[in-house]
Image (tube, rainbow, N blue to C red):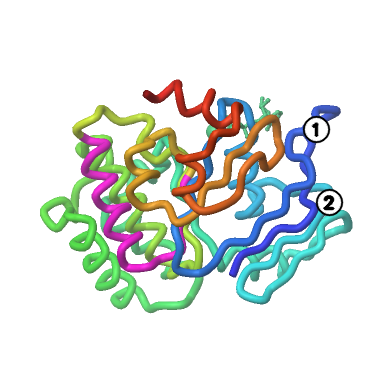
């Protein structure tokens, strides 16, 4: 389980996330929706401690952090082991092959030997449909292929929660589809996914839960079916943009 209580995050004097409370269940796909600037990326980054909230608590699989005081490196490391992030812009290491990109973290964190990491990386690249691209460098891969390498890289650390920040918004529709297929496969395997996206077809197909952020607050948190059928004016106004 991943839960957040009373989480608050500011940048300077701008209060971005305001008293966020959430509870996500293992094995479910949560889609975070909301207008641009509503705090979706900031929330995801707080879950992975790429940003440090000023207030609140974060609990993942029983490990709990209380924000507000100084966090030790050990606390941050422990918490980070629970999640892995996939970014909009892929963020692969350009001078490493696909295999090296995926094998790096499990080797560095000492969990696997070099040969075990490479075997795992091969298996994960096959899983995302890139068996023919294992030794390619990122700049020879399409955006869709690069993003699938990034997903394999995130899977390589065996995170409890996979966090995706608009994973397809830099891609043409055709390439978006191949990445969405991988996400649907992961959702069907009952991985715990948290996905920020504007792809409503994807959200409707796989989301168990929708969190709708509006101006840094949770304006909806509930089953996906209830969200898409909601008659709340703010939700209808948001959804009408996609019709
Ligand atoms: P979303 O992902 O929903 O579009 P963000 O979380 O990226 O929203 O941003 C929410 C608000 O926080 C925006 O007003 C943005 O300008 C601001 N913001 C995000 N990151 C930073 C930062 N590192 N420094 C200052 N302001 C930031
Ligand atoms: Mg964003």
Marking on residue 186: none
Residue 44: x percent and y percent? 59, 47
Q: Is residue 14 above or below residue 176?
A: above
**Residue beneath the point at 21% across and 39% down:** 141
Query: Looking at the rendering, which quadrant does residue 243 occupy?
Result: top left
Q: Is residue 206 above or below residue 165?
A: below
Is residue 182 covered in magenta? Answer: yes
Q: Which residue is mark 2?
A: 55
Is residue 66 covered in magenta? Answer: no
Marking on residue 15: 1
Mark 1: is the Cβ under 8 angstroms from ligand 1?
no
Residue in the foreground of this view, choosing between 130 and 94:
130
Residue 132: x percent and y percent? 11, 53
Q: Is residue 97 visible?
A: yes
Q: Quadrant of the N terminus?
A: bottom right
**Residue beneath the point at 38% across and 65% down:** 156
Bounds of the magenta segment: 175-195
Residue 89: x percent and y percent? 41, 35
Q: Residues within 10 Å of mark 1 (few under 14, many from 20)?
A: few
Q: Residues within 10 Å of mark 2 (few under 14, many from 20)?
A: some
Query: Looking at the rendering, which quadrant does residue 13 occupy?
Result: top right
Q: Is residue 194 visible?
A: no
Magenta segment's dominant SS is helix
Q: Is residue 113 above or below residue 20?
A: below
Q: In the picture provided, is 236 more to the left or to the right than 140? A: right
Q: In the picture provided, is 144 more to the left or to the right than 219? A: left
Q: CA distance from mark 2 to mark 1?
A: 12 Å
- SS category of the residue bearing label 2: strand
């Amino acid at each position: 389980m991943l839960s957040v209580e009373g989480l608050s995050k500011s940048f300077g004097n701008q209060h971005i996330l305001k008293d966020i409370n959430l509870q996500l269940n293992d094995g479910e796909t949560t889609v975070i929706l909301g207008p641009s600037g509503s705090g979706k990326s900031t929330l995801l980054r707080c879950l992975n401690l790429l940003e440090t909230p000023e207030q609140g608590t974060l609990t993942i699989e029983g490990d709990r952090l209380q924000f507000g005081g100084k966090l030790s490196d050990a606390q941050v490391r422990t918490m980070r082991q629970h999640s892995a992030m996939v970014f909009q812009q892929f963020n692969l290491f350009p001078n490493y092959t696909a295999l090296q990109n995926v094998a790096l973290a499990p080797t560095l964190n000492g969990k696997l030997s070099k040969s075990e990491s490479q075997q795992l990386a091969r298996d994960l690249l096959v899983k995302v449909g890139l068996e023919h691209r294992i030794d390619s460098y990122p700049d020879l891969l399409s955006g869709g292929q690069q993003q699938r390498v990034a997903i394999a890289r995130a899977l390589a650390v065996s995170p409890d929660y996979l966090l995706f920040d608009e994973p397809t918004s830099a891609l043409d529709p055709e390439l978006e589809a191949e990445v969405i297929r991988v996400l649907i496969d992961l959702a069907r395997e009952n991985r715990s996914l948290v996905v920020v996206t504007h792809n409503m077809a994807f959200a409707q197909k796989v989301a168990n839960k929708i969190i709708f952020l509006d101006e840094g607050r949770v304006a909806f948190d509930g089953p996906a079916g209830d969200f898409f059928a909601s008659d709340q004016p703010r939700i209808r106004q948001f959804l009408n943009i996609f019709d």
